[in-house]
Amino acid sequence: MIIAIDGPSGAGKSTIAKLLAKEFGIDYIDTGAMYRAVALKVMGAGTDTSDADALGALLDGTDVDFAGGQVLLDSEDVSGQIRTPEVSMEASRVSAIPAVRKKLVALQREMGVRKSVVMDGRDIGSNVFPGAEHKFFITASPEVRAERRRKELAGKGENASFEEVLADIRKRDWDDSHRALNPLVKTDDAVEIGTDTLGIEAVLGAIKKYLQ
Ligand code: DC
């Protein structure tokens, strides 16, 4: 069984996906974390991503995996490091590069054929697993998502203004949905759920109803 959850950043996808995975006792694959891990590696190595050979070499030597709720980049736990605003912007940029998508989509397909998963991202229902049995598209207005993200950052002691966070969200929305390859899109067979006024429990309840 594959449950595909797509939508823009900050809509609540990962919270919902994690709870669903727990409920059904299956694995949760956070594909955004995989793009973030590659972005972190590119930033650390200072790789010129327009140099196909350099990027190819970096990707060939890159392993991204999950274990015990942690995101592993070349076996190192990078779960905390990949959640900064800088990595968010870089992840959005590198995710538009065909070689990066080719590598990560192949990894994601491998993870999904081995076992039942809940996978969240931007192109799971449209590209990674177009034949997935269950597809959900989780949305919320940019303002609501920006306020959630601002609070989350403040909770980690990082104070960003609402306007700054909103501008980042709008830029990522635009870039993620306008890139040439596998852009963020709602497929016709996905169930759309808006989370502006729905709490987590209500969203979870709605999804479980569809799954039954
Ligand atoms: O969900 P997230 O914010 O952690 O994702 C980080 C970036 O990765 C996002 O800006 C777009 C990209 N991404 C993607 O292109 N395809 C996916 N399946 C998941 C994420």
Image: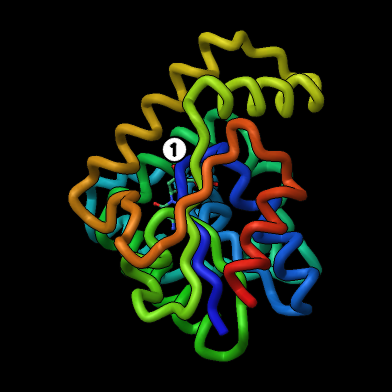
**Which part of the image, by quadrant, shows the C terminus?**
bottom right
Q: Residue at x 40, y 33 (%)?
A: 172
- Give the quadrant of residue 104: bottom left
Mark 1 lies on a secondary structure that is helix
| Residue 103, image quadrant | bottom left
Q: Is residue 112 above or below residue 183?
A: below
Q: Height in image: 7 above or below 76?
A: above
Q: Residue at x 34, y 49 (%)?
A: 184
The foreground one among 161 and 84 is 161
151 sits to left or right of 55:
right
Going 47% across and 75% down the picture, which residue do you hit?
Answer: 107
Q: Would residue 110 be found to the left or right of residue 146 on screen?
A: left
Farthest residue toward the bottom?
A: 114
Observer-nearest of 128 and 190: 190
- Residue with the most extreme left position: 180
Task: List x then y, in percent, for residue 46.
Answer: 43, 41
Percent across and percent down for residue 51 are: 23, 50
Looking at the picture, which amino acid does disc 1 mark?
Glu
Residue 28 position within the rendered picture, expressed as x and y whole percent measured from the top left: 66, 68
Q: In the figure, 138 relative to 132: above or below?
A: above
Q: Quadrant of residue 59?
A: bottom left
Q: Is residue 155 left or right of residue 35?
A: right
Label 1 crowd (10 A; few <14 / some 14-19 / many >=20): some
Badge 1 is on which residue? Answer: 90
User: Residue 34's x, y, as percent?
Assistant: 53, 58
Give the residue displayed 44% in from the left and 78% down from the top.
Answer: 132
Figure coloring: rainbow
User: Considering the image in quadrants, where does the N terminus appear?
Assistant: bottom right
